[in-house]
Image (spheres, grey):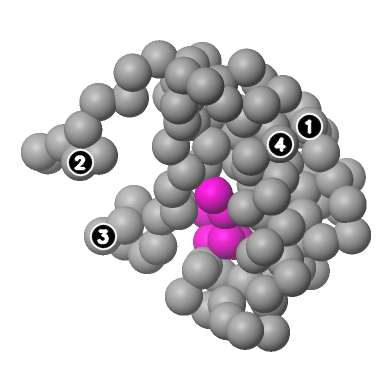
Amino acid sequence: MSEDCIFCKIVSGEIPAQKLYQDELVTAFRDISPQAPVHVLIVPNEHFANLGEMGDAQAAALGRIAHVAGQLAAQEGIATSGWRFITNIGADGGQEVVHTHFHLLGGRPLGPLLTRS
Ligand code: DGP
């Protein structure tokens, strides 16, 4: 648990969120500012700044995240239509919340991976 981390507080229940799934390793909840009809965030319960801070020791949590992503895609009805699963790292990656999280996006054509800015 990191003191000022909003996602740690969502994991612990200190801050409310629309949780879709939680177990001893991971938590999934709806993004507060959805960019697509389905926009779910999946996070490890343990605090890591980003994916670059995780490794072999977190294999169980990372594997669970992948598994839960597939389960939730099916549950949200986008398993067949398709979906995108992304994690932003650092400033150039566009990361705003410094707790590893993966965006599960779908429910409409998502377009090219990158846009010019
Ligand atoms: P990123 O740019 O990859 O760090 O994305 C952070 C995402 O987190 C962004 O899509 C909005 C979402 N978010 C930020 N604060 C909250 C919150 O308090 N609750 C929920 N559910 N989502 C949040």
Residue 114, disc: 2
Res 71 label: 4
Disc 1 and disc 4: Cα gap in Å? 11 Å
Above-or-below relation of 13 to 8: above
The answer to whether residue 33 of the structure is visible from this angle is: no
Mark 4 lies on a secondary structure that is helix
Instruction: Give amino acid for label 3.
Output: Asp
Marks 2 & 4, CB-CB < 8 Å contact: no
Q: Residue 32 appears in which quarter of the rendering?
A: top right
Mark 2 vs mark 3, CA separation in Å: 12 Å
Compared across the picture, whether 5 is left or right of 108 comes to right
Q: CA distance from mark 2 to mark 4?
A: 26 Å
Q: Which residue is mark 3?
A: 92
User: Was residue 47 drawn as part of the magenta stretch in this picture?
Assistant: no
Relative horizontal placement of residue 75, taking residue 78 as reference (left or right) = right
What segment carries the magenta color? 97-102
